[in-house]
């Protein structure tokens, strides 16, 4: 299946700088783990900046960690099979918002981390989203994965480990692996925090061969979702994890999303 169509209703605000700074980027997702939590919607809503509100599944907000290893990343127009690689982490929340009278959905990304010096320098300047530099510890053996991350600034720590299994857990809010796959495939449009309050950098992921497997997790740690000042005890619980391997993809910059902090409306 070719999944290169754009999600409907992207924000209409655009600037020459936004268009100039990021050409289409192509590469391969060597490995992507999506470790997901089910969250009390009221707690999640309180942690979100305007204009975002939680997107819910069976009464729960959905947040999680994306642990992604990229390879052969390069401008799409480069004809040679060359490119850079990196380990990256993102905390992400499934969200909805209104833009120019149209209902939108995607993901809000409060934090990005990377082991790439280039990504941490370019993030927020050339590439959308501030990228904090971090150390990654990765152990992979067959269908077993362990990925740990600790940021240099001490602001984020993550560890996910588990093994591939045929089906999603019966305790998940998703009733099948297929329904979970469809939900996350729709979350291709992401908005990241910037240094300017109420302004979010847009980035769209387009996958040519979307395919997920279920990952049975035996350890999960996230300093963001374990922060009790944000999520009181009992308000957040691990739900499920998905694995993607060897996925041809493209990144496309999208117009900034700006919001009036006074009333939560888009500008």
Image (spheres, rainbow, N blue to C red):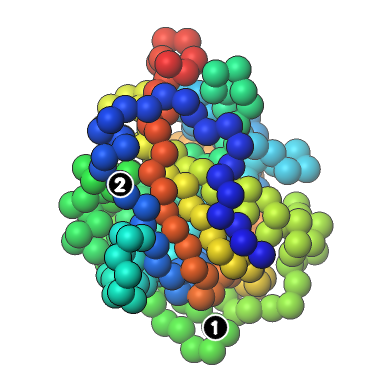
Quarter of the C terminus within the rendering = top left
Instruction: Relative to 12, say whether 232 is above or below.
Output: below
Quarter of the N terminus within the rendering = bottom right
Q: Residue 184, position in %: x, y?
A: 62, 53
Q: Residue 132, position in %: x, y?
A: 26, 52
Q: Nearer the viewer, residue 142 or 250?
A: 250
Side (left or right) of 249 relative to 166: left
Lower sequence index among marks 2 and 1: 2
Label 2: how many Cα within 10 Å (few below 14, some 14–19, many 20+): some
Which residue position holds label 1?
A: 144
Describe the element under mark 2 as helix, strand or loop. Answer: loop
- Mark 2–mark 1 Cα distance, whole angstroms, equals 35 Å
Side (left or right) of 249 relative to 237: left
Describe the element under mark 1 as helix, strand or loop. Answer: strand
Q: Identify the residue at image location x=55%, y=18%.
A: 100
Which residue position holds label 2?
A: 22
Q: Residue 51, position in %: x, y?
A: 50, 23
């Amino acid at each position: 299946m070719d999944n290169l169509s754009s999600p409907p209703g992207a924000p209409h605000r655009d600037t020459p700088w936004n268009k100039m700074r990021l050409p289409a980027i192509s590469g391969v997702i060597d490995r992507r783990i999506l470790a997901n939590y089910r969250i009390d919607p009221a707690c999640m809503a309180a942690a979100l900046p305007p204009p975002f509100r939680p997107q819910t599944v069976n009464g729960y907000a959905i947040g999680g960690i994306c642990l992604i290893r990229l390879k052969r990343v390069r401008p799409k127009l480069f004809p040679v099979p060359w490119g850079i690689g990196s380990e990256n982490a993102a905390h992400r929340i499934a969200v909805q918002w209104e833009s120019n009278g149209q209902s939108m959905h995607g993901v809000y990304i409060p934090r990005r981390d990377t082991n790439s010096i280039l990504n941490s320098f370019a993030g927020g300047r050339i590439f959308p989203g501030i990228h904090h530099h971090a150390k990654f510890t990765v152990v992979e053996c067959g269908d077993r994965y362990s990925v740990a991350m600790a940021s240099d600034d001490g602001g984020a720590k993550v560890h996910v480990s588990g093994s591939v299994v045929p089906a999603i857990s019966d305790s998940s809010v998703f009733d099948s692996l297929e329904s979970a796959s469809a939900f996350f495939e729709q979350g291709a449009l992401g908005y990241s925090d910037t240094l300017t309050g109420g302004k979010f950098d847009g980035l769209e992921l387009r996958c040519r061969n979307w395919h997920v497997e279920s990952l049975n997790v035996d350890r999960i740690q996230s300093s963001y979702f374990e922060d009790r000042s944000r999520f009181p005890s009992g308000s957040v619980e691990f739900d499920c994890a998905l694995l993607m391997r060897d996925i041809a993809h493209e990144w496309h910059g999208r117009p900034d999303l700006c919001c009036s902090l006074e009333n939560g409306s888009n500008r």
